[in-house]
Image (cartoon, rainbow, N blue to C red):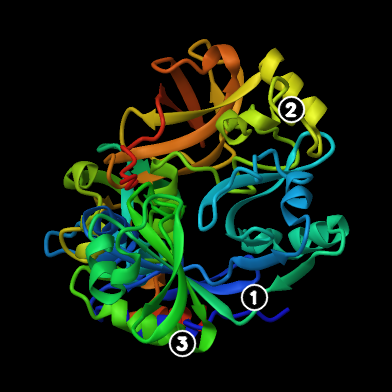
Amino acid sequence: MSLLTTPLDALHRELGAKMVPFAGYDMPVQYPTGIIKEHLHTRAAAGLFDVSHMGQVVIEGQGAADRLESLVPVDIQALGIDRQTYALFTNDRGGVLDDLIITRWGENRFFLVVNAACKQQDIAHLRAHLDGQSLTVLEQQALLALQGPAAREVIRELCPGAAELVFMQGCRADIEGVEAYITCSGYTGEDGFEISVAADRAEHIARALLSIDTVQPIGLGARDSLRLEAGLCLYGHELSTEIDPIQAGLMWSISRARRADGARPGGFPGADVILQRMVDKPPLRRVGLVVDGRRPMREGQEVLDSGGRRVGSICSACYGSSVGKPIAMAYVERDSGEVGTSLQVAVRDKLLPVTVTAMPFVPQRYFRG
Amino acid sequence: MSQTPSELKYASSHEWARLEEGGTVTVGITDHAQDALGDVVFVELPEVGATLAAGDDAGVVESVKAASDIYAPVGGEVIAINEQLEDEPETVNADPYNDGWFFKLQPSDTSELDGLLSAEDYQKQCDDE
């Protein structure tokens, strides 16, 4: 099967990117600068990410908020216009089908950004649950992310209309003569923006952003290490149909109104399982691990307690460039997951000493106004 | 385009070997290998005094992307390791053929070097990958 490409494919190649297959797309994993420098640059200035592989979907029509509420444990009714929320598509067993961002574009109009790997499944899932509302996949729309402490100044320069956005807020704005929908959001733990623009104008916007001194192109490699340091989940690693939101440490993503004692309790797939989990506490929990040393951990490696008993496994690992050490996220038995607990990770023929560490590994720097 | 110095010998597993004037052999990984691995964050080296046969496991190099075994390109006794790599593994990326060397061997049989690839043949192998 041939790989799909994003509207910035030619630009990535011109910039010397190493391309790798990811979720069916040919994507830049890094540029000649390398993953560590790209990561550090994003935390120090601003990084430009091509996230056009992600699915952009619009749901519109009378009752759209109710229909979405039947699929996600979020108070969609309370979501203001041009405000965003993190959400999970849950299944009947309380597992997670995908995580996504929902933005309210109008009383009955919602903009969804979903993971590339889950895109087709999500669209089918949505279609199966709509009741007369329309679903439009924005196939001809690119998505760029500009992340880092300098991102806001860059936006102020190129798109003043979006420079006052606060975290999880969006607006329609003109950037370099192109109409875009810009949100203050991202996947790095930094202040930043995501810019949805017509595919045929995406390269023009990307070049304008890259022409500013503080902006460098950043590949998927650094995107992963940045999100891991920020303690953010990645579907297929920390989230799956086998993991419920409570085990994943995402209780905060279940809106108050949808909880057992809320105004509209339950009413989403697997609500009975998930709401019971909030009471029972799951046997496993998601934790951060930091290695005492330099040797990196890898996904899938077993986590042992100090006595050598298996207590869990690693779901994501990377070199935390800003932390300056290898870091990981793991699911471990509840009793082994207290911050400060000394554990071990089986790396090939050795046992690495690791410590359970609070997440995020680096402070989040979202702009909340 | 990666560098492949003509005066070195190469293993198909991407190590280089340099016969020094005193008869010792210095070993490292190639420019092609460091480029494919990406940023190196950890190097495990053999112990000084260990005796290795050609093809034996001699350590591990771990990058932001992957772990890769290092093999001894020729047999011999390990007489030195590059301790700088413990604190500055990124030297492997910056200077793979000089400051980024891994270990030095006192070879048991210098003629084993003849069994390794020339720069030209190694480059051809990389081009075909």
- How many angstroms separate mark 1 from mark 3 (CA)? 14 Å
Mark 3 burial class by Cα count in 10 Å: few <14, some 14-19, many 20+? some
Question: In percent of the image, x 40 and y 47: which residue is there?
Answer: B60
Marks 2 & 1, CB-CB < 8 Å contact: no
Q: Is residue A117 above or below residue B49?
A: below
Q: Position of residue B10 (x, y in %)?
A: 36, 70
Separation (CA) of disc 2 from disc 1: 32 Å
Residue behind mark 3: A201
Say which amino acid is labelled 2: Ile
Mark 1: secondary structure: loop
- Please give left or right for residue B1 compared with residue A248 in the image: left
For the N terminus of chain A, the image quarter is: bottom right
Residue at (70% x, 63% y) in the render: A119
* Chain name for mark 3: A
Q: Please name the residue that numbered disc 2 is placed on.
A: A274
Left or right, A120 with reference to B23: right
